[in-house]
Amino acid sequence: MAVDLGSSGTRAWVPGRGLVESAWDDAFGRPVRRGRIVDAESCGRMLGHLADTVLGPERHGSVIVLSHPVLAGPEHRNLAGELLAALGPSGAMVLSSARAAAAYAGPRDGGPLLVVDMGAELTEVTLLVDGAVADARQAETGLSDLDPGALPAELARNVLDMITAMWRQDKHGAVRGALRKGPVLTGGGALHPDVTHRIALRLGTPVRPADDPSTAVVRGAGMILNSVLRRAGTGTGSIRPGRLR
């Protein structure tokens, strides 16, 4: 099972079943704010309920992959790993949302890539080089914070400010190479053509909105999960409970 804990709800992708989505409700409150777990007990109950529904009581042989914001920090990542391990799967993995989004929507030609994730309460820009995070910026504002009338201009400005800051500190030309390729856009903000058009116009380069951008992260995490399961099935690799990546 692959899981994306968003600020507005949770999404899961299950092999053989597909996408499972739910908004936060009164039963669990809002255990995730600004992309971070703020109520571990409620989050654990929610994940337990999800695992019961999707995986059933017998978890032997199951693997759970959970994505996190790139700049969530070690405390959040460790807590997420502990919550996953408590569910009793045979394996658990925590990985960045940018890696997951790139797996789903990024080009397959390698090289530097910019991933722009415009969510409900966070906006992140990540520079990946050969799949590894080379730089990342975050604004703790998102779609839910912006006035609908000003949304296109403000969201595009936040994204442009972060890319400009990366550009100024880039000594190896990776940002320039990623811009020539076109940044990948994910999250709810990528559903707004006026936002994507403004970003493309200001950057002077085409952009790559992901197919179904609101679910790009969990679908990419699902693709990584499938890869893990294939390796484990052929005996070429394994994953231990609570292992972080």
Image (cartoon, rainbow, N blue to C red):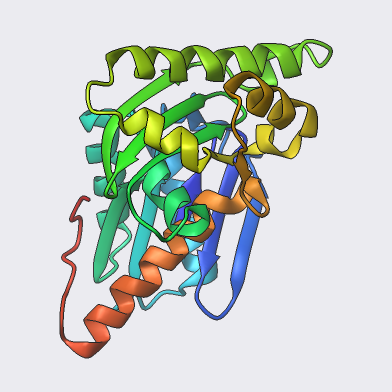
Left or right: residue 176 versus residue 52 is left
* Identity of the residue drawn at 65% across and 29% down: 200
What is the tally of numbered marks visible in this picture? Answer: 0
Q: Is residue 36 visible?
A: no
Residue 203 position in % (x across, y down): 58, 23
Front in this rendered view, residue 233 or 179: 179
Left or right: residue 64 versus residue 4 is left
Front in this rendered view, residue 232 or 176: 176
Which residue is farthest bottom?
A: 234
Front in this rendered view, residue 160 or 173: 173
* Identity of the residue drawn at 24% across and 47% down: 82
Residue 130 position in % (x across, y down): 26, 49
Residue 137 position in % (x across, y down): 39, 21
Task: Look at the image and tell me in which quarter the N terminus lies.
Answer: bottom left
The vertical placement of 96 against 229, above or below, is above
* Identity of the residue drawn at 47% across and 53% down: 106
Residue 96 position in % (x across, y down): 35, 43
Left or right: residue 181 versus residue 58 is right
Front in this rendered view, residue 186 or 146: 186
Quadrant position of residue 60:
bottom left
Left or right: residue 131 versus residue 47 is left
Q: Is residue 238 visible?
A: yes
